[in-house]
Amino acid sequence: MTTNPNSPALVEYSGAALAYLGDAVMETLVRQMLVMRGIGNAGKLSALSLDYVRATNQSRGLEGLLPHLTEEESAVYHRGRNAAGAHPKSASVNDYRRATGLEALFGYLHLKGDAARLEELFAIYVRYLEGESANADEEK
């Protein structure tokens, strides 16, 4: 995506606005990944997508990303995290704020047009979440 020259500079977008866009970017990436895995049942796709986009899981998956973020990306994450407002009952305040920061980062990378970095971080996020799930299953 190319940025409109009449749009504000990327640093001027609010964390909330970046998270709003990032929510859709993450949803699209997750849906694409699941469809590409050959899952064809819409109900199953919908249920599985929640494992990747639920605030509590986004907060968990963020742990795998934090060591890989550049200074710039970390600043965007913090801007989004600090912009989080009211949270849903399904997540703690901390999980919701961290998820909002993650979404802000994905929205920022999308607006920046850095698809390669977006894909790279998404792949790390998925590997971490899926590895965490496998470890949790082994501990049971």
Image (cartoon, grey):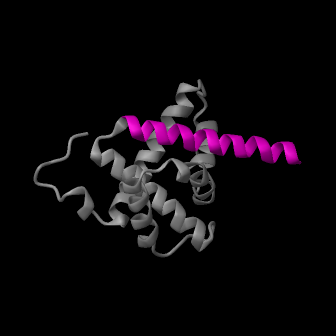
17 to 109, vertically: above or below:
below
In magenta, the rendered stretch is 116-140
Q: Residue at x 39, y 66 (%)?
A: 79
Using the rendered image of the protein, determine whether residue 30 is visible from the camera's viewpoint.
Answer: no
Whether residue 24 is visible, yes or no, is yes
Left or right: residue 111 compared with residue 42: left
In the picture, residue 20 is in which quadrant? bottom left
State the residue lying farthest toward the left. 6
Residue 59, compared with residue 43, is above or below; it is: below
132 inside magenta stretch: yes
In the image, residue 46 lies at what x, y percent? 58, 42
Reply above or below: 70 against 94.
above
The extreme right residue here reads 140
Residue 112 shown left or right of residue 130 in the figure:
left
**Where residue 21 appears, x then y in whole percent?**
36, 54
Which residue shows up at 57% across the image and 59% down it? Answer: 55
Q: Return the x and y of residue 98 as percentages of the image width and height.
A: 53, 63
Q: Quadrant of the N terminus?
A: top left
> Which residue is at the front of the view, 7 or 27?
7
Q: Is residue 51 above or below residue 45?
A: below
| Prevailing secondary structure of the magenta residues | helix
Left or right: 10 as drawn, with respect to 79: left
**Residue 105 image-quadrant placement:** bottom left
- Residue at the location (48% across, 33% down)? 32
Q: Residue at x 60, y 49 (%)?
A: 64
Asked whether 10 falls inside the magenta stretch, the response is no
